[in-house]
Amino acid sequence: MIASRKSLLARAQAEAVGRALGRLHPGVEIQFRWVESEGDQRQDAPLADAGGKGLFVKSIERLLLANQADLAVHSMKDMPSDSTPGLAVAAVPARGDVRDCLVSPQAKQLADLPPQATVGTSSPRRQAQMLRARPDLRIEPIRGNVDTRIRKVMEEHRHDATLLAVAGLQRVGLGQHAQCPIDIETMLPAACQGALAVQCRSDDHVTLSRCLPLNDPISAAAVHAERKIVAMLHGDCHSPIAALVQPVAGQPRFQLRVRVLSPDGKVCLEASNDASSRDLSRQIRALVEQLRRQGVEQLLRGSGI
């Protein structure tokens, strides 16, 4: 099994999947290979300028394709919306908390931050939604692993606050910093936030079958729908796109929500609907069409509406 060496989160996620596979297949030896991804190597530049979230995936995928590992574990939201030929997502385990949270030594909510407070984030989605809620905030780029970003805010005071995913903090044992989740009305999450992807070669039927029991069908349907929405909008790491597909408790239905913003948060296009499990693909197309009628293509090209 392979994952990023430098990322505390990547290691924690890979080890959790390894433990689950070990319980399912006690006769199979689980070995880990830690590598330095391109995203780890390029901590000096904003993520979008360095090549986007896919940087954390490409190096690992190359090793899978070269038969130097059988399995990889990714944060699903880091994966490009287009699948890599020769590789398959073998399982999507049950999804974690989808929300973002505020990490700050002085505030529990965005409203508590002082005027002109500095917020460290390199996410166009987080930036746009924060400025939509608080136009006075000053957004500054921040890179590094989860623990590095927390230290920059809580100990070094380089920024007044940052935003991190609740699920990631919980997975690395830093749940004490996830006590201030932001409601999804204010901060709609990134597509696939809180979800893992267990990836292997598409012709490796043994590994595929071993991983299948890890798959949560409802989580898998939701995140694959979110990936399809982003792909249909032609979104990339520069795009302030938020998307969430949530199962309706006790019903075979999903609620779909998408939000696309200008970088400064002044323009916000939204669309929502619901769908049965059978009708999910058609309702995704209808939702994207709603956004196109509102001018989403012009907005994403940066030409306004």
Image (tube, rainbow, N blue to C red):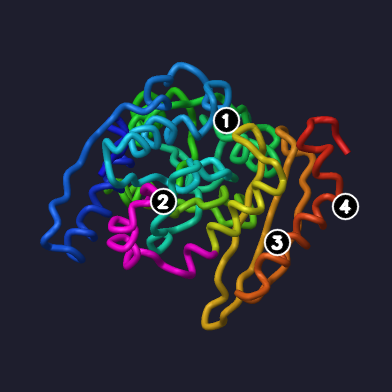
Magenta highlight on residue 77: no
Identify the residue at image location x=27%, y=48%.
173
Is 43 above or below relative to 276? above
SS at badge 3: helix
Q: Is residue 98 left or right of residue 173?
A: right
The amino acid type found where label 3 is placed reads Ile
The amino acid type found where label 2 is placed reads Ser
The residue where tag 1 is placed is: 117
Numbered disc in front, either 4 or 3: 3
Mark toward the start of the polypeptide (3 vs 2):
2
Separation (CA) of disc 2 from disc 1: 48 Å
Q: 270 or 77: nearer the eye?
A: 77
- Asked whether disc 4 touches disc 1, contact meaning CB atoms under 8 Å apart, the reply is no
SS at badge 1: loop
The residue where tag 4 is placed is: 293
Separation (CA) of disc 3 from disc 2: 26 Å
Mark toward the start of the polypeptide (4 vs 3):
3
Question: How many other residues sit within 10 Å of disc 2, few (<14), some (14-19) or many (≥20)?
Answer: some
Q: Which residues are magenta?
A: 199-221
SS at badge 2: loop
Q: Quadrant of the C terminus?
A: top right
Identify the residue at image location x=41%, y=59%.
92
Prevailing secondary structure class for the magenta stretch in the rendered image: helix
Is 249 above or below relative to 43? below
The amino acid type found where label 4 is placed reads Arg
Question: How many other residues sit within 10 Å of disc 3, few (<14), some (14-19) or many (≥20)?
Answer: many
Residue 153 placement: quadrant: top left
The residue where tag 3 is placed is: 284
Question: How many other residues sit within 10 Å of disc 1, few (<14), some (14-19) or many (≥20)?
Answer: some
The residue where tag 2 is placed is: 202
Q: Is residue 112 left or right of residue 91?
A: right
